[in-house]
Image (cartoon, rainbow, N blue to C red):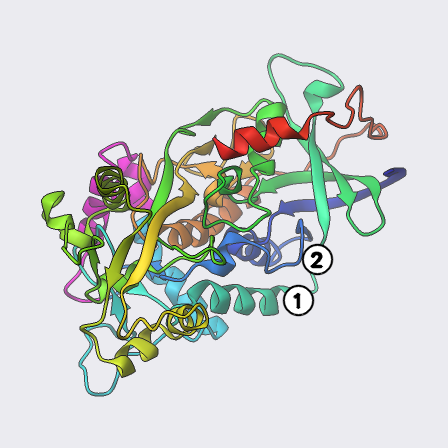
Amino acid sequence: MSQVKSKTIEIENLVIGTGAAGLMLALKLATRSKVLLISKGELTECNSYYAQGGIASVLDVNDSLEQHAIDTIRAGAGLCHEDIVKLVVSKGPKAIQELLEMGVDFTKESQNNSTDNQNGLHLTIEGGHSQRRVAHCNDITGQVLINALIQQVKSCDNITICPNQMVIDLITSDKFAPNFGSNRCLGAYIFDRITHEIYAVKCGRTFLATGGHGRVYLYTSNPDNATGDGLAMAWRAGCRVANLEFMQFHPTCLFHPKAKTFLISEAVRGEGGILKDSSGRPFMDDYHPMGSLAPRDIVARAIDNELKKSGQSNVFLDIRHLNKEKIIHLFPNIYSLCLNYGIDISNEMIPVVPAAHYSCGGIVVDANGKTNVERLFALGEVACTGLHGSNRLASNSLLEALAFADIVAEAAFNEPVEYMRENIPTWSSGKTMPPDEQVVLSHNWGR
């Protein structure tokens, strides 16, 4: 049984979530004010940590911001907000430079190959992109990125880190003194997963960077904690939500009974990987001029169609034409893990299937990351900024997280910090009770 504590923490900024968006935002806010950083589990338990591909950014002289924007809008089926697309892609080079200064070890181009970007980075190409523009750290970009950001956060005196804390609900003015002209976020109730106690945080500004809700699907690339908590609590607080039907399915999740959540990076297709059916026939040219490098939604639907026609359980990704040394150099993690499952990708095709991957919709925010509830911001996968339309362009997720961390921090500094004058009431669970039919949840999950 949880214990209710009467204590209330007062802080200028409450950042909920420790993926790329939350960590980078905390660092930027901490340059001018105090930050309380909340993580549901350990700091590495986030989707960002598992990102393999990289960060899309215009770094090559043969590329352009205009072309990156065109590719983004095309992948999003024309439903993207053009102004947001241009804003986000314009911030890519700055974001990469900041990460380089933090010590993020991006993969460099080999000495034998020339490069047309000033940092000498190896840029790969992924589905939907017309140019090589994805900066990466081999095939563990998210892991390297998050570890670097965590190191920066831990060394910052203005940031208090609280892992294993579950935010139960947002505290809004409507819950205490309804005013139809203004609903303000005043803080949050938080459950300590170690002590099982509940306490309140009263803050001037609240930032949701809680990630997506891909774990509501049975077959997904998402870790167990991607359950949409931030989205749900924002909706309960009165936030607008949109485009929740646009759940992106990643085309190539490893098909193996012990590896339901392991992705085969889109960069594998960028380096020449070809999708084939069980007979070894390439099939993507039947669906799109870009073949296996078509946007994710098109590739995922094509695979689904092929499986329905054939009755097979999976298709295959073939990268055997690359020499083994290059495969191990570019994809050491993928090579090693597949080998652990008995698949040598240097001489065997990789069994793959689509899996729920990324929510293109979420909490509606404006160009500054503001929700319709005052003093509540949202960024990262939990937010619907208008960047992705109906389908996210590969490697635009980390770009958006980093870009909006910069945007939201600047917007927040322009708002005065105001606290709720009244005491926050002790948390009450109301009439909630344990569910008596867990099977209903299991059935919904299966569907």
- Name the kind of residue labelled 2 in the image: Ile
Q: Nearer the viewer, residue 213 or 345?
A: 345
- SS assignment for the magenta stretch, majority: helix
Residue 83 magenta: yes
Q: Residue 127 lies in magenta, yes or no?
A: no
Secondary structure at badge 1 equals: helix
Q: Nearer the viewer, residue 275 or 378?
A: 275
- Report whether 321 appears left or right of 438: left
**With respect to residue 191, does 290 lie above or below?**
below
Residue 42, percent from left and from top: 66, 58
Q: In this rendering, does residue 204 appear at all? A: yes
**Mark 2 secondary-structure assignment:** strand
Q: Nearer the viewer, residue 144 or 90?
A: 144
Q: Residue furthest bottom?
A: 111
Q: Quadrant of residue 14?
A: top right
Q: Which residue is mark 1?
A: 154
* The N terminus: image quadrant: top right
Q: Residue 334's spot in the image, x, y percent?
A: 39, 68
Which residue is identified by label 2? 161
Q: Which residues are magenta?
A: 60-87
Labelled pair 2, 1 in contact (Cβ < 8 Å) = yes
Q: Residue at x 17, y 81 (%)?
A: 114
Is residue 133 something that shows in the picture? no
